[in-house]
Image (cartoon, grey):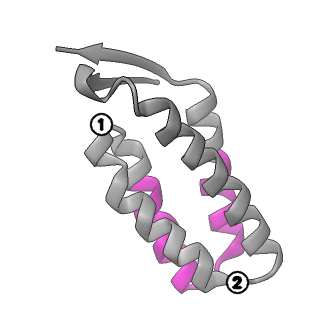
Amino acid sequence: MTVYVDIDLKEIIPLFLESRQEDIVKMRRAITECDFDKVARIGHTLKGVGGGYGFDFITDIGREIESAAKDENSQVISKLVKTMEESLANIEIIYEE
């Protein structure tokens, strides 16, 4: 997956991506604890931050995670978390002026 990001964000993108990895760990833990409120909060955060940094797929996944958490659907959440993890692992970032 290729993501085009504004060159002005180049210095903060590594921290942004590291935070998303932490979100994955937190969501997996919350799923095992059946803490759907925590999953919903993280999903809501993802929905808000993804597009602002040029990662629209994170916004989309966050929206779906938030919805699945409200339904307490751990199977769907797990699939979405895996999709996000795989997408982040295979991302190519192109910085644009």
Residue found at x 22% / y 15%: 96
The residue sitting at the front extreme is: 11
**Image: 14 above or below 43:** above
Residue 54 among those drawn in magenta: no
Residue found at x 52% / y 85%: 70
Quick one: label 2, few (<14), some, or many (20+) residues within 10 Å? some
In the displayed structure image, the side of residue 76 where residue 13 appears, left or right: left
In the displayed structure image, the side of residue 81 where residue 94 appears, left or right: left
In the displayed structure image, the side of residue 30 where residue 7 appears, left or right: left
Q: Identify the residue position indicated by label 2 in the image.
A: 35
Residue nearer the viewer, 19 or 93: 19
Looking at the rendering, which quadrant does residue 29 occupy? bottom right
Identify which amino acid the numbered label 1 is placed on. Gly
Residue nearer the viewer, 35 or 65: 35
- What numbered label is drawn on residue 54? 1
The residue sitting at the right extreme is: 32
**Image: 60 above or below 30:** above
Magenta highlight range: 60-82
Q: Secondary structure at mark 2?
A: loop
Residue nearer the viewer, 20 or 84: 20
Quick one: label 1, few (<14), some, or many (20+) residues within 10 Å? some
Residue found at x 26% / y 46%: 52
Q: Could you tell which of marks 2 and 1 lies nearer the N-terminus? A: 2
